[in-house]
Amino acid sequence: MSNNSYAIMEQQPSIKGLANTPLVNVVRGAIPGPNAVGIEEHDDVGHLVLRGDATLLASAVTEVLDLAFPDQPLSSCSRDKTCIRWISPDEWLVTVPGTETSSVESSLRDAIVGHVAIVNVSGGQTIVHLTGKHASDVLMKSTSYDVHELNFPTGKVITTTLAQAQVIIRRLDTDQFELVIRRSFADYIWSWLRDAATEFGVNG
Amino acid sequence: MLKIHCPYCQETREEEEFHYSGQAHIARPTDPESCSDEDWGNYLYFRKNPRGRHMEMWVHAAGCRKFFNVVRDTVTYEVEQTYLIGHVPAGST
Ligand SMILES: [Zn+2]
């Protein structure tokens, strides 16, 4: 521990407490189709928002997360299940395996010197992966952003609208996308994606 | 639909990601206690409504959530340029 004083809220559910994902009540299951699209929730993830000057954050992030710092707009750096995304000139979104969330938060707080904010927003958003040959077709029906690989290559991160909601999209591969969605819009986006993917089929 | 270049994301995006946010470059009187009622009233309430070139602010509401400046023609809707908060438009002195 450094001289910083701070309170960390442990958001992992205890044995007694029951934590549900925002998608607990949605319709799941496969829809038969020729080239089914995978729509899969990744709920065991810790989300940390970092706000502040890039010069204050860069070295600490590199040290704690063992990742390069994405200082260019719309870029990201990832390793295994850890990822940091550029969101805005003074905002980054870090995701780590759920069980590591508070230890990573503590390590970042210890490593960063200066006026920054680190907020655990794991309870406020969730992640959905969209996979398959027609994943980009589903996005083309849902967002005004040009998701062609020339404009949206692997590793690029954009914040835009999906249907009527805000979403952070990262391309993981040619046929794989990660959507970070808000808790309160999660069931709406889930239903929208299943509807948009129905013509191709869904691996739910 | 307008296509607007966000100077922070450094990309041109669809209008639906943005919100209009009023006239740009409105300077707050440096000493509100001693400025006249007319100056204060002008600062608070009076806005330009030109037919043609207009300096305005937009916010990239569904993107990076930053405010920035836009020079836009209110007749043709053409966006002449966009630039960062705190800067002046290119071509001005
Ligand atoms: Zn932007």
Image (spheres, coloured by chain):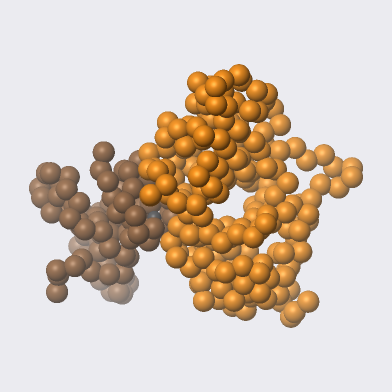
Chain colours: A orange, B brown
Residue B88, placed above or below residue A129:
below
Which residue sits at x=11%, y=44%? B75
- For the C terminus of chain A, which image quadrant? top right
Please state, as top left, top right, bottom left or bottom right, where the N terminus of chain A lies in the image.
bottom right
Q: Is residue B75 above or below residue A64?
A: above
**Vertically, is A189 above or below A174?**
above
Q: Position of residue A125 (x, y in %)?
A: 62, 45
Horizontal and vertical percent position of residue A100: 76, 58
Residue that appears at 55% across and 35% down: A132
Q: In the picture provided, is B38 more to the left or to the right than A85? A: left
Can residue A194 be seen at all in this image of the molecule? no
* Residue A16 vs residue A35, the one in the foreground: A35
Q: Is residue A75 in view from this perspective?
A: yes
Image position of B63 (left or right of A13): left
**Front-lying residue, B69 or A92:** A92
* Quadrant position of ligand 1: bottom left
> Is B66 left, or right, of A75 in this rendering?
left
Horizontal arrangement in the rendering, residue A52 relative to residue A121 (left or right):
left
x then y, percent, for residue A173: 54, 47
Give the residue displayed 43% in from the left and 61% down from the top: A73
At 71% across and 31% down in the image, what residue appears? A24
